[in-house]
Image (tube, rainbow, N blue to C red):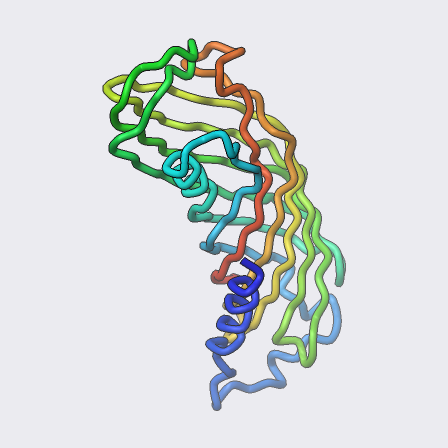
Amino acid sequence: MIKFHAFFLAAICLVMPAPAADWDTKDMRLTDYQSLPHLRVNTSIGLCYRFGSVSTDLNNDLQSYIYGLRVGRNLSADAAYFFSEYFGAGIDYSYFTASNYLESAVVSDPETGRLMGMGVMQDEIGLHAVGPAFLFGYLVGSGNMFLLLSLAPVKLIYGDKQLLMDKTFDIEGSTWGLHSRIAFDYRILQFLGLGIDVAHLYSPSVKLTVNGVSGAVKDKEPLGSMTYSVGLKFYL
């Protein structure tokens, strides 16, 4: 996993474009707060890895199935207004999604724990995170590179559409978490940039309900994660 993380960051650095030859760098040189774009909007997509151990009491197929649900796509969007040269505030939103399918699995009813038999198992997971964000920004070099740190207390809303054999279950839960992010922007135009983000989500395990009933067999789910993203940055 560590080798993959290093490869991801190295690959992004290699493909980051250089400024166009006819770009007037004098117009892009940002030296004070008045010349900074005060509003920054970010949209990005990436890979997300959710933390959490998997019971070794499960057979290999089920362990692989659960690990498959821990890795998924992450879409994020945030907007922040910088009210000083270094500090800003705004709103942070991200959405994690993952799914998996197992054709022949020994399944148990998540409401009662009773053995249902052998059949299809399918999960479609979605996790929303939204909250206010507080940012620190720092210009690097002549002003076309921007390093940002953000911290956001977020509301987490978890949902899992689960199919076991011919029966469906709605598994849901919500809690609070803390979303931190390091972002590096590279401006290619005065109003547009490319960038990479590395984000960490801290959260306690969420208590779950199954079809609206609490105290089910699957009563908790870990939501903490690490995300690696690339995206477009807009400066207004």
Does 232 appear above or below 176? below
Q: How many marks?
A: 0
Where is residue 137 shown, x and y percent of the image? 71, 61
For residue 141, which quarter of the picture? bottom right
The residue sitting at 65% across, 59% down in the picture is: 38
The residue sitting at 66% across, 43% down in the picture is: 152
Q: Quadrant of the C terminus?
A: bottom right
Q: Is residue 119 left or right of residue 61?
A: left
The front one of 58 and 181 is 58
Q: Quadrant of the N terminus?
A: bottom right
The front one of 32 and 9 is 9
Does 110 appear above or below 78? above
The residue sitting at 51% across, 83% down in the picture is: 19
Where is residue 129 shown, x and y percent of the image? 55, 37
Q: Is residue 159 left or right of residue 92?
A: left
The front one of 64 and 208 is 64
Where is residue 229 shown, x and y percent of the image? 50, 57
For residue 103, which quarter of the picture? top left
